[in-house]
Image: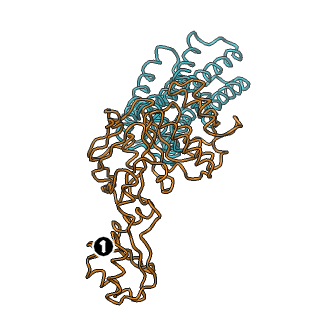
Chain colours: A orange, B cyan
Amino acid sequence: MKEPLLALDAVTVGMKSRTILSEVSLRLTPGGWFGLVGPNGCGKTTLMRAALGLLRPLAGTVRLAGTPPPYPTRWASASFGPRLTHPRRRVRTELRLRVSAIGGDRSDLDRAWADTGLTDSRVCCGDLSLGQAQRLAVATALVGQPRLLVLDEPTVGLDAGAVHWLRNRLRRYAAAGGCVWVSSHDLHEVERSADEIAVLGQGRLAYAGPVAGFVGERAVAVHLRSSEPDLLRRVLAQSGARFSEEPDLGVTVHDGDAAQLGRLLAAHQVPLLSMAGPSSDGLRSALDDLVTVAGRPGAEKGRIQ
Amino acid sequence: MSALGRDVLRAMSVPGPWILLALEVVFAVMVSLSTAFLHLDPSPSLALGFVPALAGLFGALTGGADARFGSLAGEVLTLGGPVRYTLRMLRVTFGLGLVGGAVGGVLTAATWWATLDVAPPAGRLTTLVLASAVAAGSWALLGAALAIVTQAQIGAVAVVLGYLMVLEPILELTMTGFVGLYPGHLAVELLTVSGPAALATPAARLIAVVAVVAGLACTLARYRPVPVTAT
């Protein structure tokens, strides 16, 4: 087993008397591509900031190659979004400054310039489109092949061609021994690219491991709509099923067996308007399922009998 | 490229802040020329009177740019931590302020030298150049330190202007015992000294006061979260 490059142990982060992350432990290994997913406000960016030493955890430890932050130059690099550069500075100058800061040479500058996909060397950062600025942010973060590359929502604003470029570029980076850590709401891309994912829900680590494991565990949700929702709820509750409810959208039964569920509802003469699932939408469905269960105060737990 | 050269290029690679230093020099020369044409006695405090404000604004704008445009986190990671970033930012703003002040002082001195009928006393012009350089460097560093403390460019600009135009005049009237510690007062005192011997005390005091604020900026930078968004 590879030695972890980044090790987070029981990291707890709070701001203004509010706990944002509770006891999150995570290991990222060199050469790997790791995804970080979860709903808005669950603490993804905060976790990344803590890992990079940009904020101090209330408790727990953070180590990059065994060293606590701040990390030496070239150890960690990050992009927290497009348009985080001085708008009047030229793109080429921006890259040159980064290359110079890490002790790089002309070839590093040329490589970074090629990564931006731009041709006009006089263009300023503020003149770029959202997608171009996003690509510049990633290209700047990649300068000097840092050991850990943290990207927060790197696909925002990118067209299909740019996403393809990003995927290939990050694959090359990881193949050279770099560790990619990407937070994203583009679950299709995460599912396609990441070796492992960490799922955050309400400030806690809900899952960490291979994508297939998470999807396989959870993609068994069955969605039901009935003309008699009260009866449906009562029957499900009596059976001990774990389900959640969304007004006007019906009921989602988690960890359910569709055939068994059908027999149960038929036996109790519950009229159904629709019955769908298990879902085949992979990570999105599994994540929705997790968020629905974790986030609904009325979510009930149990098992279909 | 050296680290200092890189930081200077970074500070000067955007239009805006450095124009304030150029303005300071232009203003000093214009006032010196006007004084000479009107056959008035040279007045260093008038010619270089805007040095603290303009240098302070230059420091605030340069030091606060990364917070304003969201590039702070990237720069902190690139340079190896928030304290290292802060020290380099303070160094470059002090250095550029020093150079700007020195250039303003040299041009003011040269204007006087060229327009006065009687040569000024020995050491007077050297003193003027040194005083201008120290005052501008210190105020530029002060502005940058305030920007790092506030983590906001516009906030730092407001603090510099508010302090110089409102707070310090009030403090000078109400807390007279501490006048020797007010950076605006010390800068003016520095610019009006007549010889090298009198330069040491106000210069040392000004540098000490600025060093305290710079120390506060470094301490806060070490313990406070680094923002990852534009402010």
On the image, which quarter does residue A200 sit in?
A: bottom left
Q: Residues within 10 Å of mark 1 (few under 14, many from 20)?
A: many
Q: Quadrant of residue B43?
A: top right
Asked if residue A116 is positioned above or below residue B44 in the image, the reply reads below
Residue that appears at 65% across and 45% down: A128
Identify the subunit bearing mark 1.
A
Q: Position of residue A134 (x, y in %)?
A: 58, 46
Where residue B51 appears, as percent x and y from the top left, is 57, 30
- Looking at the image, residue B122 sits to the left or right of residue A124; the answer is left
Name above or below for residue A266 compared with residue B131. below
What's under tag 1, amino acid-wise? Answer: Arg
Residue placed most toward the observer, A244 or A264: A264
User: What residue is at 42 percent from the left and 41 percent from the top?
Assistant: A32
* Residue beneath disc 1: A242
Across and down, in percent, residue B203 comes to 45, 22
Q: Nearer the viewer, residue A41 or A243?
A: A243
User: Which residue is located at x 36 percent, y 55 percent?
Assistant: A213
